[in-house]
Image (spheres, helix red, strand yellow):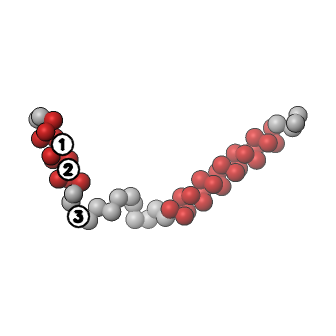
């Protein structure tokens, strides 16, 4: 398989309709909120261990 054939088949695959990308059940707000909560929790834990300041 040559590079040109591979690129052509990948471009054809990417151009197929009906592929919205991502999973339908993953909400960006839930994912972002969960990540924010985890980061804030890690920040809180870090500040509890760093009491010398």
Q: Is residue 12 above or below residue 4?
A: below
Position in image of residue 46 (x %, y %): 75, 40
Residue at the far right: name it: 52
How far, Cα to Cα, is label 2 from label 3?
12 Å
Q: Residues within 10 Å of mark 3 (few under 14, many from 20)?
A: few
Q: Which residue shows up at 79% across the image and 42% down it?
A: 47
Q: Nearer the viewer, residue 9 or 42?
A: 9
Identify the image quadrant of residue 45.
top right
Q: Which residue is mark 1?
A: 7
Q: Which residue is mark 2?
A: 11
Question: Is residue 48 rendered to the left or right of residue 27?
Answer: right
Q: Which residue is mark 3?
A: 17
Identify the image quadrant of residue 25.
bottom left
> Are dots 1 and 2 in contact, CB under 8 Å?
yes
Q: Quadrant of the N terminus?
A: top left
Q: Secondary structure at mark 2?
A: helix
Q: Which residue shows up at 63% across the image and 54% down it?
A: 36
Q: Is residue 27 above or below residue 35?
A: below
Q: Which mark is residue 27?
A: none
């Amino acid at each position: 398989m040559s590079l040109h054939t591979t690129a052509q088949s990948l471009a054809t695959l990417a151009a197929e309709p009906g592929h919205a990308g991502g999973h339908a059940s993953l909400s960006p707000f839930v994912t972002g909120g969960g990540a924010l909560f985890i980061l804030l929790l890690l920040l809180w834990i870090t500040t509890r261990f760093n009491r010398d300041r």
